[in-house]
Amino acid sequence: MSTPARPPEPCGLSSRAAADRLRRDGRNELPVLKPTPAWRHLLAQLTHFFAILLWIAGALAVAAGMPELGLAIFLVIVINGVFAYLEEHRAERAAQALQQLMPRRAVVERDGSWLEIAASELVVGDWIQLSSGDLISADVQVSQGRGLSVDQSALTGESVPIGVGAGEPAFAGTFVVEGEACARILATGEKTRLARVAQLTQSRLHPPTPLSRELGRLVRAVAVVAVGLALVFFAIGRFLGLPLRDGFLFAVGVAVALVPEGLLPTVTLSLAVGASKMAKRGALVRRLEAIETLGSTTFICSDKTGTLTCNEMNAVETWTASGVAHIRGNGYEPRAALEVDASSKPELLQLALVAVRCSSGRALYSEGRWVSRGDPMEAALHALSLRLGIDLATEERAAPELTRFAFDPRRRLMSVVTSDAVFTKGAPDAVFERCTQVAAAARRAAAHMAERGLRVIAVAQRATSGQALPSSASEAEAALELLGLIGLADPPRREVKAALAVCRQAGLRVAMITGDHPGTARAIAQEVGLAVDLVVTGNELPEDEAELGVLLDREGVVACRVAPEQKLRIAKALQARGHVVAMTGDGVNDGPALRQADIGIAMGRSGTDVARAAADLVLLDDRFETIVSAIEQGRGTFANIRRFLTYHLTDNVAELTPFVVWALSGGRFPLALGVLQILCLDLLTDQLPALALGTEPPSSRLLDRPPYRGHIVDRRLLVRAFLVLGSLESLVEMLAFWLSLRESGWRYGDTPTGSSLAFASGAAFVAVVAGQSAVALVCRSSTLAGFSVPLRSNPRIPLALLTTWAITACLLLVPGLARLLGQRAPTGLGWLAALLAFPLILLVDAAAKAVLRRRLARAAELRRPSASRSAEAADVHGHAVDR
């Protein structure tokens, strides 16, 4: 393995010495905050806003002489709090396990060889390699650095990188902007400067996400409505002459009926399940809340290399003044067939030698195959030198390197100064500008290579014998002599074309953002199936943000020669036009753009530590199609949240209806459900189906339409829950209650006997359970009938429903429980009427969805070929956010 610099003797540690120091000093990890005790987490679940309302209600029930009711309410709070705590704890453990899929690594010298190990295993005295993009894992002293520049903003707040020379320190938590070096570790773990700063600045507080803010608004709104209606019903009861105790009972029942106690843990579970599914598909979510944002993505700004292409470079063609040479090789394999005249080989050898001297990436043989170590393009240049038989070690001894000017995305050049020459490689136009003479044939050759999709590197040199060492890159990279061009191929990923077709169908606009030549970028874009509408270079981008947004807000944009700061401007301009932007990146300077984007996406294999730290999503396989899969899962999670919200709100309507009917009748129509029954419905029969809805797998049709841009709780959801599903369920509930009372001889205005009321109340209870069972099925889709969605696609649904009915049977048939709740198993007529809720909701919902599907079909016929939709399509799309 080639190294950036050999450490002075003595060399690196032995494995045994390193193991001894690791046991003595501990792992190279930052000290973590003392974890919050479990009892505090549990206490938080027992004291949130909803829980406080119920604690107050329970205390008042005990004070009013109803200890059984108070105890039941307290039990609800405790059971729900424990359940929420367990779900939160499980989600945290899942997130920690997912983070371990992407450990930080470091290249260290042990036993005289360089190898890659986990950064946590570094010890004092180790020698490590540092190169552009690396996050420095410990406090180090640099030795023989080559143009090393370090960003220390994590420690100092100063965003301008500083140069670090031999003998100078660099600190953990900073990162290498450019250059490379060998460094000796001085401090690890809690003894680093970063650890001392972290102990002063670490905080558990996180800013609220859009999802948490919206749920917070919903919780507050429900709480205000619950308390307000409770007070109204208490006043109505007192007006009708109810004793204080009974009036309070009604008020508590109203409050309990409207509080969706299981809402927040269900949201957490849904996000955690979504994160786990994404990880299995190669996407690591670093923040659970980012999943919901993924589902709203409208614009993807994708890198080319490694995302749309395989990032397996191969030098396939060269141009020198003597002619063109073609190379038929396999990746980084040194053996290859060269088609070249003998007369041109000396020039080709010099071209390859200069190119590899300006490179730090290497081709290595590992585990039975040749792979790249470092930049794949530079590894391909190393492979080219091996194919030509160049002895790099001998050449380096003959002309040792004196200084190096690392690649800069603004210069687009890299140079090495030796004892007798300056070697330079970089983008053809950047190299041409610094050459004394460039033949027209060279410019034509560069353009022809780029038009065929090759990445083109120009190579030049200048003799320096007897001259002073250049003090800057501009001084070194002047009056160069062009040696030739190297064309490298990076084949597109086979799956990208299909993924881009899915993006078009899903209403996702895709732009290719690359630093490559326009001809190369256009050729690759066309090869992968991107409908190219605009090719623009970085220096052609408008300075005005509004103009930039108008220019780029289209399908099929290819932006070339784009600097990292321009990626940041692109993200801002698209966001200003209302887009939810997903931005990919892998380099050090991509960090600001990744943080600015709504979803920053870093490469897990080829990306730098800095890019991964700035991202919300890390692609473990670097594949573009994984982005599409993650967006699909994000849409599915968004749909799941709407599903169980619809389910909860429908149940609230059915639980509130008996109190409304009682109040409107002036107390002459008996109360169909009591407070304890409502608590059982909320806690025992509703919770499992709601959780099962939160784990519903994404529909195969989620990417058939543009993303839904509305709120999680919108007018359509409320209409469906309150006016359609909730009304139907309430109608059957009150019908079953009334028929059971009539069967016992009750007349309107009479006070029913205890047994007749218990039979009727049992029928109402069964009607709600039956209705909610149907609602669980119909909530699985916004366009398909409940019985059309296969149960096998989510086996948790039938399991939850079976468990719910088993619990219901216990509450009706176990004498002690039934007596406590004030209900009994219904009569035959009561069962018949109550179970009518199940088919009625299924059939009415199926009919409504049939009408909706016809409207969607008509809207699709009217939809224009562009991304815009007809007014009718926009009106009905909100109904079809899932299936």
Image (cartoon, helix red, strand yellow):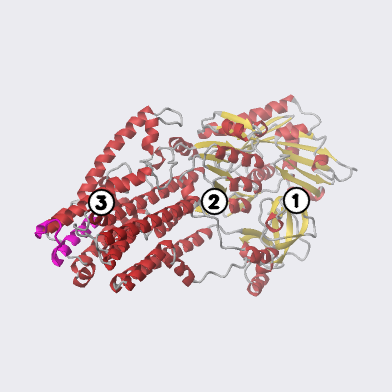
The quadrant in which the N terminus is found is bottom right
Residue labelled with disc 2: 616
Q: Amino acid at mark 2?
A: Asp
Towards the viewer: 1 or 264: 264
Q: Nearer the viewer, residue 191 or 750?
A: 750
Q: Mark 1, mark 3: which one is toward the viewer?
A: 3
Front-most of 257 and 473? 257
Asked if disc 3 and disc 2 are in contact, CB closer than 8 Å, the reply is no
Dot 1 crowding, Cα within 10 Å, few <14, some 14–19, many 20+? few
Residue 336 seen: no
Image point 51% across, 62% down: which residue?
A: 96
Which range of residues does the magenta coloring cover? Answer: 742-770
**3 or 2: tag closer to the N-terminus:** 2
- Quarter of the view holding residue 512: top right
Q: Residue at x 54, y 33 (%)?
A: 553
Cα distance in 3D space between marks 1 and 2: 42 Å
Residue picked out by circle 3: 774
Q: Quadrant of the C terminus?
A: top left
Q: Report the residue that reaches farthest toward the top.
A: 440
